[in-house]
Amino acid sequence: MTIYAIGDIQGCYKSLRNLIKHSGFKPASDQLWFCGDLVNRGPNSADVLRYIMDLGDTAHCVLGNHDLNLLAVAYGKRESKELDTLDDILNAPDSAEMLKWLRYQPLFHQSKKYRVCMVHAGIHPAWSIKKTKNLAREVQNVLRKGDYKMLLEKMYGNYPAYWDNKLDNWERLRFITNVLTRMRYLDSSGALDLDIKCSPGKQPIGYHPWYSIQAKRKQHWRVFYGHWSTLGLHWQNNAICLDSGCLWGGKLTAAQVGDEKTRFIQINCGKTL
C-alpha cells in the first residue's frame, strides 16, 4: 500500500483530478489522505466533496478551518464572508448528505505502520502524538454526536492562548480546534498567535513557527499538515507542509509515502482569486 497525502484543495477540483492522474495512485491498493481545507474560495467545492466521498474507505480526511467555516455557515452559526464560495454546496440537492459526511471527519489521522500522521495546521509542542490523537477525538465526538451547533458557535475566538490540561468545556474545545486547524506561530512564552500569517523570517521578533519549537512528539513520526500557503512545501523537524498555494496559482502537492520514503508530486495550478 502507498499513501498519497495531499495539501489544501479549497475547491480546486480540476487540479485535484490532474494531480491524482499524474500521481500513480491505484484505487485498489492505495490510500489518499487529505490535509483539510477541502472547500472554499475555489470554484468547485461540491465536486471536490462528492469525489472524495465516492472514494469511500480509500480516502482519509482531516478537517481544516475552511471546512469548519462551511459547517458554521450551513448551520447558521456564522455569516458567509465576501470571498467564500460555498453556494454550490449550500444550494445542492445533496447538501445535507455532504454536510453530514464532513461533520463526521476527524481532526487527526495516523498510520502506525508508516509512523506518519496528519492534521490540518499543526501539533502543539506540548502534545505528544498520542495526546494529539486523544484531544482531537474530544472535538470529533462533539461534532459527531454532541451539541455540534453550539461547538460551531463557540469555537471562534483566539483565547485561551495557552495550553493547560485543566482547561474545560468550550475553552478547551476552542483551544484544541485552534491548534489543529489554525495554528502557525507561538510566541516565546508559548502563547498561540493566530493572526500572523506570513512566511518564517518575516514574523515579528519573538514569534516562532510551531514546528521549530522543541516538542514532546517523537521526531521519528512524520507529520503532514497544510494551512500555510505562504510557507509552501516545507520539511523541517519531520513536519511536512503540503499547502503550496494551489488556490493562489501555485501548486497542488502530494506526498507519496512508503517505508521510510517520501516522494513529492506537484502540478501547476491556475489562479482562481
Image (cartoon, rainbow, N blue to C red):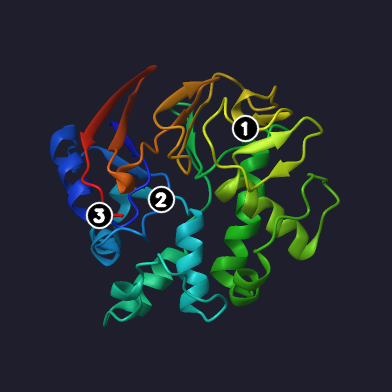
Question: In which image quadrant can residue 230 be found?
Answer: top left
Residue at 53% across / 46% down in the picture? 108
Task: Give the position of the N terminus as an image quadrant.
Answer: top left
Q: Amino acid at mark 2?
A: Cys
258 in relation to 230, above or below: above
Q: Nearer the viewer, mark 3 or mark 2?
A: 2
195 in relation to 172, above or below: above
User: Where in the figure is residue 221, as x and y percent of width and height?
Assistant: 53, 24
Residue at 52% across / 20% down in the picture? 236
Q: Secondary structure at mark 1?
A: loop
Residue at 78% across / 53% down in the picture? 160
Give the CA distance from mark 2 to mark 1. Answer: 30 Å
Reading the image, the residue beneath label 2 is: 61
Reading the image, the residue beneath label 3 is: 55
**Front-most of residues 67 and 218:** 67
Q: Is residue 268 left or right of residue 164?
A: left
Reading the image, the residue beneath label 1 is: 203
